[in-house]
Image (cartoon, rainbow, N blue to C red):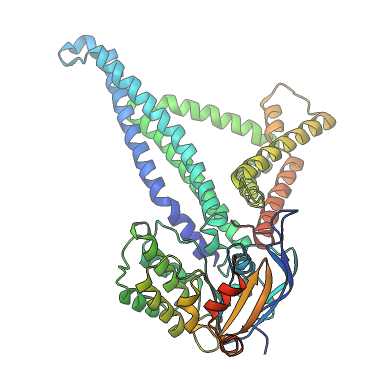
């Protein structure tokens, strides 16, 4: 089966003379997995995610989604949550839902309203009147309300309170179909470890480790969080 | 998808512009009523001194309303332009670009939608400004005088178009399209810079203007435009020839396709 995401010798630099943000990365992500993309600041996580969404161009190598280069076809099957607020703040939550419904055929409006209700978010509220954490929840709801094949979530729990993190992680687990893959980047490893099937450790733009979470626990006798701290010890 | 994009592009600015149009029309009416009162007092004041308003009051209201009305007129033109540019910048290459550029829509459709909505807003603002003049003429009761200006404008237009025919009409339309696409293209180039993207866009725009002016200047010298002393000469400088028109159409095409290509293949969002 074609991997949902594949990097072939992928490199990316921002400035000449600087260390590349990604350096000859080779990766294959299979379907139906929840994968943690982990690494310290500047390790290339966000660069890889942006490349997968066509927000940056590659320097060399290839990045394929479902066997195709990044483009309109791949955008139909990828649901992306960036690390920043990317919605039009002049719209209400309801209008934003309508926007997603207009552009994404796989958007499930009922699911979005259900999640809004669970998190006590007023659909009539203007986005600019919401707190930063609530805006992030709205974005996550929109992204997870799609029936996508690949969910790419960049720091989905970074800006929300610990109480909401459990709900969000639960939302991620329960709202993706079994054949879909979730690629999740975060620093809060201990919070997400329980939901991960695989992890990718990125260091200086290179893949330091790509392994199933169970194998890590069995082979190293420690949690992913503990291994991360060991590998990336300053 | 283009229809949907257009819907959101129009929605993004229409409310702000409608409010501005309403303010402009209110100021137009206030200015016109003031002028009508002033003219009537100047003409008939001596015969009706009981209802005379002190001259200092007229002076104050006339100066204030003239400044406000003139300011509103210029402000409306600038604001329309700023809103069109801001929509493209914020929606395509700043934070909202994370959403726009990940929609299952081609960047050519994005460019086309921004172009159509921008042209519609420019057209609407022009119509509102013209309507303001007509309302002023009607209230002050100087429509016959305004119509003389209109006749002069029509005469000039006829002079030019009689000579050049349809090419001049096309030139006006192509100029509007090219102007917007040149700005959009500059923004697309500006986002290629890792830092100072706005300055990159401004620099690109100014660079294009300078290069094009130089190119056209040199071309004019080579071909040898001959000022004949008529309005036709003026037209030859601003447009009005098929060669000039084709050059502008080609430019517009380059801005459009290259801009869309940059967004598609060379996106560089912060």
Q: Nearer the viewer, residue A194 or A98?
A: A194
Q: Nearer the viewer, residue B200 or B55?
A: B200
Please name the residue shown 35% across and 32% down the image. Answer: B28
Q: Is residue B136 left or right of residue B2?
A: left
Residue B267's place in the image compared with B162, above or below, is: below
Give the number of marks: 0
Q: Nearer the viewer, residue B102 or B122?
A: B102
Q: Quadrant of residue B179?
A: top right
Q: Is residue A158 left or right of residue B50?
A: right
> Residue B226's spot in the image, x, y percent?
78, 25
> Residue B139's spot in the image, x, y percent?
32, 30
Q: Quadrant of the N terminus of chain B?
A: bottom right
**Residue pushed farthest left?**
B50
Residue B12's place in the image compared with B156, above or below, is: below
Q: Quadrant of residue B20?
A: top left
Residue A149's place in the image compared with A159, above or below, is: below
Q: Is residue A174 visible?
A: yes
**Residue pushed farthest right?**
B222
> Residue B245's spot in the image, x, y percent?
71, 43
């Amino acid at each position: 089966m074609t991997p949902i995401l594949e990097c072939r010798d992928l490199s990316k630099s921002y400035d000449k003379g600087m260390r590349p943000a990604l350096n000859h990365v080779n990766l294959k992500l299979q379907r139906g997995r929840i994968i943690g993309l982990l690494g310290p600041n500047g390790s290339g996580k966000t660069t890889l995610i942006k490349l997968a969404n066509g927000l940056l161009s590659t320097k060399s190598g290839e990045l394929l989604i479902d066997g195709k280069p990044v483009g309109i076809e791949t955008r139909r099957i990828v649901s992306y949550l960036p690390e920043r607020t990317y919605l039009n703040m002049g719209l209400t939550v309801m209008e934003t839902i309508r926007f997603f419904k207009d552009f994404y055929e796989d958007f499930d409006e009922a699911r979005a309203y259900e999640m809004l209700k669970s998190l006590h978010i007023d659909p009539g509220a203007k986005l600019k009147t919401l707190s930063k954490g609530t805006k992030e929840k709205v974005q996550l709801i929109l992204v997870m309300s799609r029936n996508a094949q690949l969910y790419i979530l960049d720091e989905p729990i970074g800006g929300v309170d610990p109480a909401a993190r459990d709900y969000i992680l639960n939302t991620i687990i329960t709202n993706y179909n079994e054949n879909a893959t979730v690629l999740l980047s975060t620093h809060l490893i201990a919070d997400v470890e329980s939901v991960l099937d695989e992890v990718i450790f990125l260091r200086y733009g290179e893949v330091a480790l790509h392994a199933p979470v169970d194998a890590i626990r069995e082979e190293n006798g420690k949690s992913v969080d503990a291994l991360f701290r060991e590998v990336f010890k300053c | 998808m283009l229809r949907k994009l257009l819907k959101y592009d129009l929605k993004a600015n229409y409310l702000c512009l409608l409010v501005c149009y309403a303010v402009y029309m209110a100021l137009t009416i206030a200015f016109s009523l003031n002028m009508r009162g002033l003219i009537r007092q100047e003409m008939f004041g001596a015969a009706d001194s009981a209802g005379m308003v002190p001259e200092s009051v007229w002076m104050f209201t006339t100066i204030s309303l003239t400044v406000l009305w003139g300011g509103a007129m210029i402000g409306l033109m600038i604001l329309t332009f700023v809103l069109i540019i801001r929509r493209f910048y914020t929606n395509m290459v700043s934070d909202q670009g994370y959403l726009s550029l990940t929609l299952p829509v081609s960047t050519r459709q994005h460019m086309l939608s921004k172009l159509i909505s921008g042209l519609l807003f420019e057209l609407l603002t022009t119509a509102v400004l013209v309507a303001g003049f007509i309302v002023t003429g009607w209230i002050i009761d100087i429509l016959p005088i305004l119509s003389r200006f209109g006749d002069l404008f029509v005469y000039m237009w006829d002079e030019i178009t009689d000579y050049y025919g349809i090419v001049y009409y096309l030139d006006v339309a192509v100029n509007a399209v090219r102007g917007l696409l040149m700005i959009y293209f500059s923004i697309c180039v500006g986002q290629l810079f890792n830092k100072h993207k706005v300055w990159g866009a401004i620099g690109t725009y100014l660079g294009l203007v300078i290069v094009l002016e130089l190119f056209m200047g040199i071309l004019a010298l080579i071909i040898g435009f001959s000022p004949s002393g008529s309005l036709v000469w003026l037209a030859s400088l601003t447009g009005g020839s098929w060669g000039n028109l084709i050059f502008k159409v080609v430019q517009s095409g380059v801005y459009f396709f290259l801009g869309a290509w940059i967004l598609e293949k060379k996106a560089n969002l912060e």
